[in-house]
Image (cartoon, grey):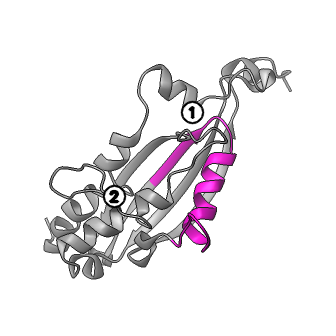
Amino acid sequence: MCPAASRATWSWRRSTRAGSAARRADPVGPAAADAALVGAEDPGFRGGSYALVQKYLHDVDAWDALAVEAQEKVIGRSKLTDLELDAPGSHKDVNTVLGPDGSEQKILRAVMPFGRPGHGEFGTYFVAYARTPDIPETMLRKMLLDGPGSGPDPLLDYSRAVTGSLFFAPPTEFQEALPDS
């Protein structure tokens, strides 16, 4: 393995952009379906899902130059234990979306680190599934825009989105009901 690739793996695996921390925050079981699938609020598309897909490239050298305490402040989690920290303005803090009742609005994440060592390119493919496009759109606004309770997300000093799209995946029943062409 290329030295740069081995160096990048652990540094980003612990971040919300690339692995364990993102999975730890994900809902499980029925709560995952509730977060990711359209429900009774839109009966014609019940069981469908909105999918935000992004490719991020990481500045591994700049990240590795940070002390562990600084990395933890950026992410909002302990690097050793993966536990959330009280870190206002951190990636975790900026990406928490609250509903009108004050409860955290959840999404279901899929993340995959990748590398092209010969090109010096290391990053993460990120997919967020949600029952409504409002939650990932709010997360993006909070990440990018400066304002009360929002970003800019400090992780974006070390990671940049190079692609991104929002898709809707209709439920199977909707697709099966389409007329043959």
* Camera-nearest residue between 177 and 159: 159
Q: Residue at x 67, y 21 (%)?
A: 172
The label number, if any, that marks residue 86 in the structure image: 2
Percent across and percent down for residue 102 are 58, 42
Task: For marks 1 and 2, give the CA distance.
Answer: 27 Å
Disc 1 marks a residue whose amino acid type is Ala
* Camera-nearest residue between 131 and 110: 131
109 left or right, relative to 53: left
| Extent of the magenta region | 126-152
Of the 4 image quadrants, the one containing the N terminus is bottom left
> Label 1: how many residues lie within 10 Å, few (<14), some (14-19) or many (20+)?
many
Displayed quadrant of residue 139: bottom right
* Camera-nearest residue between 7 and 140: 140
Percent across and percent down for residue 3 are 13, 73
27 left or right, relative to 137: left
100 left or right, relative to 121: right
125 left or right, relative to 173: left
Q: Residue at x 84, y 22 (%)?
A: 180
Circle 1 — which element?
A: helix
Q: Read off the residue under disc 1.
A: 36
* Camera-nearest residue between 8 and 119: 8
Residue 130 falls within the magenta-colored stretch: yes
